[in-house]
Amino acid sequence: MEISYRVADFEGPLDLLLHLINRHKLNIHDIPIFDLVEQYIEAVRQMQQNDEMDTASEFVDMASRLIYIKTVSLLPVHDEADELKRELEGELMEYQECKLIAEKLSKMTEGFGYFVKQPEEIEVDKTYHGVHEPFEITTAYMYAVGKGKRRLPPPKESFQPIVQRRIVPVHARISYVMRKLFKKGKMKLTALYYASEDRSELVATFLAILQLARDKKIYIDGDGADTQITALAGENENGNQ
């Protein structure tokens, strides 16, 4: 009776090789490649006849591997064939060992069913039973207090320097500078700066002078503390022609 092979009967090409080795009582440590190749190829041909080649690509790959080993074995120097053969024998021994362990584990789990335990309410003791040194408690308390304060919004006093700071508009300082020049005609630049009451007014004065110089309403001459500004002709007290 002819034996038929199906891909579903073997987990892979190594499984089929082990089946052939055990069936013909071959030595796994010294596989007769010439005999094994014929048996393996015959099994693959039967898979082709059963139209199972769509799922047997890995079996065909192993067949080509065996044929290659057989081919290089015919060469006068067949070191490569010996190396490939040893590699294949090692893979088969590892696979056989894993298969034996899987069978043992399967037998150990026979008769075991599914166990389901109903949920139970667990009483939780929320009492703290830790023992600490006094300095540890103090440190933890100070850390907790500081952390809590960091989450609070900043006090109003923190915004007072920003909110209460006087904002001096540049156009107001432009009018101020032109009024001074209308009365005196020419004056030192440092005199305008010294007359500023705060930083905001000082910055606004500086920007006002730059604006007037760009608009060619004043003329700046000199350097350092001797720098003087002069109103150009045709400017009135309000800075208009």
Image (tube, rainbow, N blue to C red):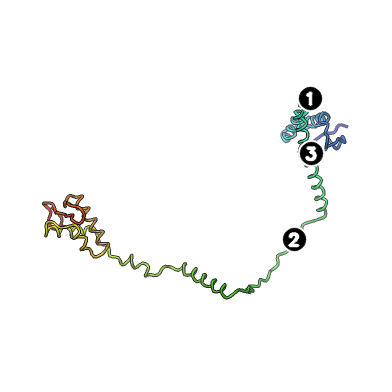
Tell me which residue sits at (80%, 36%) in the image: 17
Work out how far the residue at label 3 is from the one at label 2, CA to CA, in angstroms: 40 Å
Query: Marks 1 and 2, Cα distance to the nearest angstrom?
Result: 62 Å
Q: Amino acid at mark 2?
A: Val
Residue ID for mark 3? 92
Residues packed near mark 1 inside 10 Å, few (<14), some (14 to 19) or many (20 plus): few
Mark 1 or mark 3: name the one nearer the start of the chain.
1
Q: Which residue is mark 1?
A: 74
Q: Viewer-nearest of labels 3 and 2? A: 3
In primary-sequence order, the first of circles 1 and 2 is 1
- Left or right of 153 on screen, residue 29: right
Measured as percent of width and height from the top left, residue 95 is found at: 78, 42
Q: Could you tell me which secondary element the residue under label 1 belongs to?
A: loop
Residue drawn at x 50%, y 71% is 145
Q: Amino acid at mark 3?
A: Leu
What is the spatial separation of the Cα atoms under label 1 and label 3, in whole angstroms? 23 Å
119, 30: nearer the viewer: 30
